[in-house]
Amino acid sequence: MHFVLVHGAWHGAWCWEHLEQELRARHLGASVLDLPGHGADATPRDQVDMATYVERVSLWIRELDRPVELVGHSMGGAIITAVAEQIPSFLTGLTYLCAFLPRSGESLAQLGGEDGDSGLAGAMRSGPEPNTVVVTEDTARDVFYHDCRQEDAEAAIARLVPQPVAPFAAPVTTTDEGFGRVPRAYVVCRGDRAITATMQRRMIERLPCSPVIELDTGHSPFYANPIALADALEQIGAAR
């Protein structure tokens, strides 16, 4: 089983560092990448939209030239949905990690607006670059990393980048012949303050997934409990 790990908003491939190590210790393949405008990628953020993300991930998977389990965290859920619509035959399955799971025609902004108990509601601020948003250090610590080790939280906060807003507004379009062909699994994080567990379960009710595994972590299980997360991914891999 080879996992391709797609990070969420503001983050980069760096967020998978502990999980990647754990998967490889179990002799499970893992690939990580920076989305355009994130991490070490130098794409100007005013040129980034959902299509840019999807193109990058799709190209990465094609170049791997092997079937992969595509894992999306948070915003990454919408990205992996759109990738599955384009290249379903390259995928063994999709795993949504406390992630947005859009139905056809839904956008990240629309789904986020449903989650009235999210700690991100009203916490985003205009970024230093046009058409970007940021979260304050205090908000990031409380919403993303409240159950993580202090050193991990501090290192993560220092690496967050302004998030382009264009991907939030783009609806994801899917069909039964594309996305609908690909098996879906979901990892619910019960203590999530960014996408509440209530919202996660609501999306699963609309688009059923199997298996559904629940973890007692917040929004960043790759830092809070990478061993439990690797256990969950290994279980999903076995189910495939």
Image (cartoon, grey):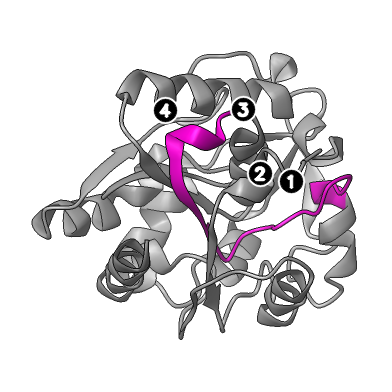
- In space, the residues marked 2 and 1 are separated at their CA atoms by 6 Å
* Circle 1 residue: 176
- Give how far across and how far down residue 109 sits, in percent: 85, 49
Precedes in sequence: disc 4 or disc 3: 3
Mark in the foreground, 4 or 3: 4
Place of residue 75 in the rendered image (x, y in percent of width and height, measured from the top left): 65, 49
Label 3: which secondary element: helix
Residue flagged by tag 2: what amino acid is it? Answer: Phe
Q: Which residue is drawn at 15% across and 51% down?
A: 24
Q: Which mark is residue 61?
A: 4
Task: Kindly indicate the quadrant of the structure image that contains residue 34.
Answer: top left
Q: Quick check: 180 above or below 206?
A: above
Residue 190 percent location from the top left of the image: 56, 84
**Is residue 95 visible in this depiction of the protein?**
yes
In whole angstroms, how far apart are the C-alphas of marks 2 and 4?
16 Å
Secondary structure under the numbered disc 4 in the rendered image: helix
SS at badge 1: loop
Quarter residue 120 falls in = bottom right
Q: How crowded is mark 4: few (under 14 residues within 10 Å), some or many (20 or more)?
A: some
Q: Counting other residues with Cα less than 10 Å from the Cα at mark 1, is it few (<14), some (14-19), or many (20 or more)?
A: few
The reply to whether dot 2 and dot 1 touch (C-beta < 8 Å) is yes
> Whole-percent x and y of residue 237?
32, 61
Q: Which of marks 2 and 4 is nearer the N terminus?
A: 4
Of residues 217 and 206, the one nearer the viewer is 206
Q: Is residue 165 magenta?
A: no
Q: What residue type is labelled 1?
A: Asp
Residue, disc 2: 179
